[in-house]
Image (cartoon, rainbow, N blue to C red):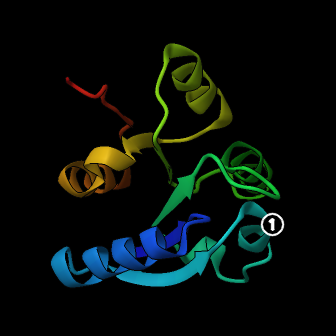
Amino acid sequence: MKILIVDDNDQFREDLSFFLEHNLKHKIIAEAANGEEFLELGNIIEADIILMDLNMKEINGFESTKKILWQYPLLNIIAITMDYNNAILDKLIETGFKGFVYKTNIYEMLEMAIQTVNSGKLFFKKLEI
């Protein structure tokens, strides 16, 4: 699957890219360090899945997603975040995200999220403590 990663943490992006390509055998087609950089990419429409950090400087994940979905409403965007509460869940759904994964358990849940969203379903699983 072709994946695009948007996250302002360089090390996290690098680690996630490595995991996706080497462990899960997906192809990373682009990376962006913030929402502004993401919106300037020329190959967004080629992505099967976009992994979008919510909390970034410049343009955050919510704004980036709203803007790109206005232009390309069928994109599959999964939020990656450290935060969770019901208000965020409502906002994720309202914005048009197809799912979300906590950064704390991204390596355990990401493949399930990608496969679920790619099959046309939503992936909004609460973190079990």
Residue 104, given in percent of the width and then of the height, sits at 31, 46
* Residue 50 appears in the picture as rendered: yes
In-image side of 126 versus 44 (left or right): left
Nearest the eye: 15 or 61: 15
In-image side of 111 versus 123 (left or right): left
Residue 63, given in percent of the width and then of the height, sits at 77, 46
Quick one: label 1, few (<14), some, or many (20+) residues within 10 Å? Answer: some
Residue 18, given in percent of the width and then of the height, sits at 31, 82
Which residue appears farthest toward the top when viewing the image?
86
Nearest the eye: 91 or 120: 91
In-image side of 119 versus 58 (left or right): left
Question: What amino acid is found at the position of numbered circle 1 in the picture?
Answer: Glu
Question: The N terminus lies in which quarter of the figure?
Answer: bottom left
Question: The C terminus lies in which quarter of the figure?
Answer: top left
* Residue 1 appears in the picture as rendered: no
Nearest the eye: 43 or 6: 6
- Which residue in the protein does label 1 denote? 36
